[in-house]
């Protein structure tokens, strides 16, 4: 009794083969960078200072007032979303046999990824922990009382 292993689907053209190669390389590189970013994020938020008890609105507001942490969190957000979307694209390509459905699903995946990246980027860069006109008792302790 012999087992026959099917040939993997060959790319439809050379351009797609290069895209798949670069997607594979991106997954490896972004995975390594994400591990570093995530463990740095967890170490800073959970082990430094008072630990998990200190994580509240004021903690996030103070952290995002520093451009270093804005870039750190933004890089983590972008890499994680693109990494996850590329992984889902690979799954869709592997398990979808109808070409039209496959294209629709991949387009939907990337559209959702783009929307989440835009929204996340807006949140990181437009976050204001001390909005003007807010009652002083609702503001974090580091905001000047207005």
Image (spheres, grey):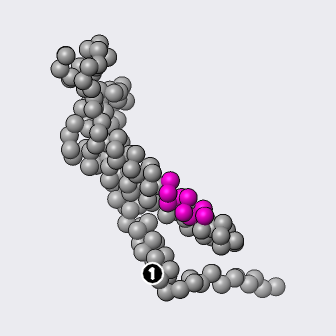
Residue 123, percent from left and from top: 35, 41
Q: Is residue 114 left or right of residue 57?
A: right
* Above or below 135: residue 64: below
Q: Is residue 49 left or right of residue 87?
A: left
Residue 42, percent from left and from top: 35, 42
Task: Between residue 43 and residue 65, name the one nearer to us.
Answer: 65
Q: Is residue 25 left or right of residue 106?
A: left
Q: Residue lying at the far top in this picture: please name it.
A: 137
Is residue 110 visible in the rendered structure shown here? yes
Q: Can residue 109 be found in the magenta stretch?
A: yes
Figure quadrant of the C terminus: top left
Figure quadrant of the N terminus: bottom right
Which residue is painted at 49% across and 63% down in the image? 86
Q: Can residue 89 be found in the magenta stretch?
A: no
Which residue is painted at 69% across and 82% down in the image? 6
> Is most of the magenta stretch helix, strand or loop?
helix
Q: Which residue matches tag 1?
A: 18
SS category of the residue bearing label 1: helix
Which residue is painted at 56% across and 58% down in the image? 108
Which residue is painted at 45% across and 60% down in the image? 83
Crowding at mark 1 (Cα within 10 Å: few <14, some 14-19, many 20+): few
Q: Quadrant of residue 141?
A: top left
Is residue 48 visible in the rendered structure shown here? no
Residue 126, percent from left and from top: 29, 39
Stretch in magenta: 104-112
* Above or below 1: residue 114: above
* Above or below 64: residue 115: below
Numbered label tally: 1
């Amino acid at each position: 009794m012999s087992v026959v292993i099917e040939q993997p689907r060959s790319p439809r053209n050379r351009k797609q083969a290069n895209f798949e190669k670069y997607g594979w390389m991106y997954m490896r590189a972004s995975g390594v960078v994400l591990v570093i970013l995530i463990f740095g994020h967890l170490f800073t938020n959970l082990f430094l200072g008072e630990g998990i008890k200190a994580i509240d609105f004021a903690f996030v507001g103070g952290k995002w007032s520093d451009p270093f942490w804005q870039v750190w969190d933004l890089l983590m957000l972008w890499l994680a979303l693109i990494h996850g979307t590329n992984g889902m694209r690979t799954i869709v390509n592997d398990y979808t046999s109808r070409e039209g459905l496959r294209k629709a699903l991949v387009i939907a995946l990337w559209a959702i990824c783009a929307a989440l990246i835009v929204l996340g980027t807006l949140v990181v860069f437009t976050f204001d922990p001390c909005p003007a006109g807010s009652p002083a008792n609702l503001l974090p302790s580091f905001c000047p009382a207005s």
